[in-house]
Amino acid sequence: MLIFLGILWVKMMGLGRLQGAEDSFKLLPVDCNKKTDEFCQAKQKSILMNMLYELYNYLAIQAGNFECGNPEKLKSKCILVSEARDYVANVTGTPPEEFGAALDWILTSNKDLGIWLKGKDPSEPVTSIDQVVCLESTRPRMGLICRFRRALTTAITTLFIFFWCLAALWGILIFLRYRWRKMEEEEQAMYEMVKKIIAIVQDHYKEWERNLERYPYVGILHVRDSLIPPQSRKKMKRVWERAVDFLASNESRIQTESHRVAGEDMLVWRWTQPSYLSDSEH
């Protein structure tokens, strides 16, 4: 009998406690609007986190679809605020007015939440939620096939750029080697031209000493015309000019003068070393 009464008392106490717990839940506020108690703050934060979670997933999926062929024909990865707000409100069941709190959380958070708030000018940072025009995910969510295709495309593009740069460097090297060889050939041709000019000017001076020439000098253009045929003068122009400059700055036996010949001023070369000195050097 005592055991029966004990069991009955325990049952009654348990039911009383359950009833008290139910009464306590009934006493909790249902509407947490403008309330600051811990329960309401936790509830509002939970709702906010749920909104951000759904928003993050939605933007990531839309950005991934845009990157992977754009099956939904999106104009941009940046989703308009109205579209994002309607989607979050439809999925979470929260009033659209609460969406501003989620945007404010993103704007004031120091963490990278993977959501980019854009204004009318994407280059300008957004400082208030009123300036937000659209939202874009910085971490697009793509399928395995899409990621593989993009990775393959990136690898092929990288290889193409690498081989293109390698070919360009090889081409530059070939061009430089060709240029160096041409410069060496041009310099050698210039020295050969200098030798021929010296020989002509010296021979002309010797002939003048033997009264075989009227003047002791010879026109520069006359020397050029005697050394370079007409069809090669354009090709040999640089070699000739370098030879003339070399003689002017490095050859003391030849002097450049200006004389009037046949009524026209003309640059001429004169051999300044007497013949007996020239012969003694050989």
Image (cartoon, rainbow, N blue to C red):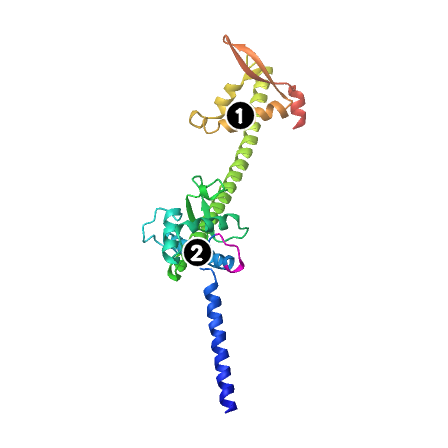
Which of marks 2 and 1 precedes in the sequence?
Answer: 2
Q: Which residue is mark 2?
A: 51
Label 2 SS: helix
Q: Can see residue 134?
A: yes
Q: Quadrant of residue 243?
A: top right
Does 91 sit left or right of 15 as displayed?
left
Q: Residue furthest bottom?
A: 1
Q: Is residue 75 above or below residue 211?
A: below
Q: Amino acid at mark 1?
A: Glu
| Residue visible at 56% across and 11% down in the picture | 259
| Residue segment shown in magenta | 34-39
**Mark closer to the observer (1, 2):** 2
Give 225 or 235, whichever is nearer the viewer.
Answer: 235
Q: How many marks?
A: 2
| Residue visible at 55% across and 15% down in the picture | 267
For mark 2, does the 10 Å Cα neighbourhood hold few (<14), some (14 to 19), or many (20 or more) residues? many
| Residue visible at 39% across and 51% down in the picture | 96
Label 1 SS: helix
For mark 1, does the 10 Å Cα neighbourhood hold few (<14), some (14 to 19), or many (20 or more) residues? few
Q: Which residue is mark 1?
A: 241
Q: Can see residue 210?
A: no
Q: Is residue 263 above or below residue 242?
A: above
The image quadrant where one finds the C terminus is: top right
Q: Are marks 1 and 2 in contact (CB under 8 Å)?
A: no
Does 66 sit left or right of 275 as displayed?
left
Give 36 or 5, whichever is nearer the viewer.
Answer: 5
Image coordinates of residue 235 in percent, x first then y, are 46, 29
Give 266 or 139, whichever is nearer the viewer.
Answer: 139
